[in-house]
Image (spheres, grey):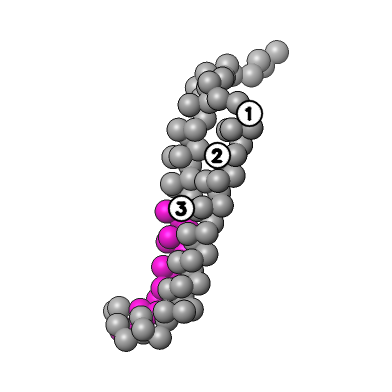
């Protein structure tokens, strides 16, 4: 393992906090605080603020899950915790 356990978990927690903060800011900012301004724009006949509250914040959350998975995979490899290095369990 090339990094300490504490450093690994600090990095994981930092990633989680940053990504959740981004999601909260996007969900709150665009779905609530900026909704009146966004509602001036129509998207397929639907006010953009309404669309964002219903669909946009969910899409951002899905993208953030993908980002988390990619970053965590890189961190696992850097820490020597790559899943490919783990032998399969014995069936006996």
Q: Residue at x 40, y 86 (%)?
A: 36
For residue 54, say whether it is visible. Answer: no
Which type of secondary structure does the marked residue at label 1 adopt? helix
Question: Please, what secondary structure does the residue beneath circle 3 have?
Answer: helix
Q: Residues within 10 Å of mark 2 (few under 14, many from 20)?
A: some
- Name the one closer to the observer, 42 or 14: 14
What is the span of residues highlighted in magenta in the rendered image?
A: 45-63
* Residue 22 visible, this orientation: yes
Q: Which residue occupies 55% across, 46% down?
A: 14
Question: Residue 17 in the image: x percent, y percent?
Answer: 56, 52
Q: Callout 1: 10 Å neighbours few (<14), some, many (20+)? A: few
Q: Disc 2 to disc 3, how far (Cα)?
A: 16 Å
Observer-nearest residue: 4 or 72?
4
Q: Nearer the viewer, residue 13 or 86?
A: 13
Label 2: state its secondary structure.
Answer: helix
Instruction: Read off the residue under disc 2.
Output: 11
Q: Are marks 2 and 1 in contact (CB under 8 Å)?
A: no
- Tell me the residue that label 1 is attached to: 5
Q: Which tag is nearer the camera, tag 1 or tag 3?
A: 1
In the image, is residue 17 part of the stretch drawn in magenta?
no
């Amino acid at each position: 393992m090339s990094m300490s356990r504490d450093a690994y978990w600090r990095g994981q927690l930092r990633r989680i906090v940053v990504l959740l903060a981004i999601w909260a800011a996007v969900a709150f900012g665009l779905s609530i605080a900026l909704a009146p301004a966004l509602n001036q724009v129509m998207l397929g006949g639907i006010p953009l603020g309404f669309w964002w509250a219903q669909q946009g914040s969910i899409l951002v959350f899905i993208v953030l899950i993908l980002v988390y998975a990619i970053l965590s995979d890189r961190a696992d490899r850097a820490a020597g915790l790559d899943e490919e290095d783990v032998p399969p369990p014995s069936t006996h």
